[in-house]
Amino acid sequence: MHDLVIRGGTVVDGTGQASFTGDVAIEDGRIVQVGGQAGAGRREINADGCLVTPGWIDIHTHYDGQATWDPYLSPSTWHGVTTAVMGNCGVGFAPVKQDRRDWLIAVMEGVEDIPGSVLSEGIQWEWETFPEYLDALDRKPKALDIGAQVPHSAMRTYVMGDRSVHHDEASPEDLREMRKLLREAMDAGAMGFSTSKTFLHKYDQRKYPPGTFATEEELMALGTVMGEAGHGVFQMTANHPLMEQEIPWLNALARHNRLPVLFNMQQTDDAPDVWKQLLVTLDRAREDGVPLLGGISGRPLGILFSWESTLHPFVAHPTFKVLRKLPFEEMIAQLRDPVVRQKIMKEQAGLLDRRATTLFSSFHKIYPLGDNPDYEPSPGNSIAAIAQRTGQAPLDIIYDLMLEKNGKAILYYPSFNYAYEHLDHLHQMLKHDNTVNSLSDGGAHCGYICDVSMPTFMLSYWTRDRERGPRLPLEWVVKRQTSDTARVYGLHDRGVLQAGRKADLNIIDPDALRLHCPEMVYDLPAGGRRLVQRADGYLATVVNGQPIYEHGQATGALPGKLLRSRAGGLHA
């Protein structure tokens, strides 16, 4: 008798092949049958009218701290994620010396907007080295499988101390020690190495993380360690408008290692057509058999404005800075007072950097998000368009809109990937074989971004709901976030529904599948806030053959494991 049988669902197996109707049978955490009619199971789930897919594999998260206290890595598991890779963008918490723990927290808070108080309260430090960090994660209960990459900023500072913080060039001795530590981490099972060269990443307001200005010599010296170890991904984010300048050495590293080199690839308003040339570069890499990959998002990177958010157009106004210290309901009551409102409107905003000033005044790119979030909004729905129709001042409109829903309404600013005010370019990028679904940023940007729902969005919007341009086939979208993402990190035991593969899967009601509007909750350690987004339509999410969620509720099962990457295969 099988442990679990999923009966009569529409199987979308993750290979990209046409879907079909049949049963899926599971024993001892493995799939033993896909298709046809399976024998009896100790537990059976009726999937008639539902999709049965592999579990989503999210390769760009920042749960490095949260993984030490939250076995569910919520909200990722709310959206069907069964495997998560963290340690992206060069930030993380190992290796670390005891006197640098608070500093690493400050870097993570600045770069990824995870409150420092949350990390200080939540992380139980049980490690110094990266192998010890993996061992600590291994001991933690987990609902899903997780893997970790070595962050450049932590390792550089571990070796170089204050010289790294001051962006000194690494000496030959520094490089030897970093290479040694990275090799030890890779041998212990690290999934790869990550770094950042973007000027968007800052901490303590104006400081750049160590590694931002690392030389190509340093990056190549570290990157080639993965080639020597025989496994691992080199992951990098850089300055998106200037990404073409980084391609020669990234391509050389991928060619040398014959292992994936993955760079974040976003469209920006400053250079809206760079993506076209990057796709040409990726075409050449594919033709040459070079594993150079662009990590892309399936929708715009969305900055969310609300009275509770980190960012909104009044955040630097002196009166609001006082009011935000009040309890939320009292703050909203004050904001509704006409006298207070007039005072805020007349004030000059405090000191803002150029990016924030541009952000808050780009009224043509600010939209009401609504109860049914629209991530491809029409220009006619922008604040600028509303102002033109009504004759109201844009800031008055924003003020009023954010007071709706008892002061919890959210506005949407599509920061990246919306220079054309539509998503046709993403349609092209998503169809490219050398791009990879990435950049959901699960666990990060708690106060102003909530893109962790990307897997659900991909399935609901690109296959069913899009009206402003062409859609994508269901089988293609499932493949993009299962077997394709698994292959990048050498996770060859999952991502496809086939006999012998790992029994990670989702059962989804396609008619009920929908995203709710993001909301701010205060459920992190120390009462910390974060934006979360819920979804309808997931009947069950299964990890290692055990349902971890059913009908949106956690089952209590914690079958997840730590992933350890090895040359020649994965060990869990």
Image: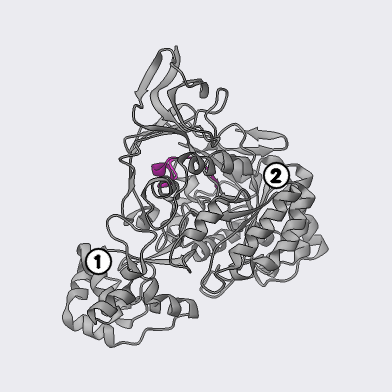
**Secondary structure under badge 2?**
helix
- Magenta-tinted stretch: 72-85
The image quarter containing residue 51 is top left
Task: Measuring from the top left, give residue 181's x and y in whole percent.
Answer: 73, 50
Nearer the camera: disc 1 or disc 2: 2
For mark 1, give the secondary structure: loop
Residue 131 on image: x %, y % = 65, 44
Q: Which residue is mark 2?
A: 186
Residue 174, position in %: x, y?
Answer: 77, 61
Q: Is there any visible trace of residue 377 in the rendered image?
A: yes
Asked if the residues shown at circle 1 and circle 2 are in contact, with their CB atoms under 8 angstroms apart, the answer is no
- Left or right placement of residue 43 versus residue 567 in this view: left
Task: Residue 341: give x, y in percent of width and height.
Answer: 22, 80
Spatial CA span between label 1 and label 2: 47 Å
Is the residue marked by circle 1 packed among few (<14), some (14-19), or many (20+) residues within 10 Å? few
Colour mode?
Answer: one colour
- Check disc 1 and report the residue beneath it: 327
The type of residue carrying mark 1 is Pro
* The N terminus: image quadrant: top left
Query: Magenta span has 19?
Result: no
Residue 180 in sight here: no
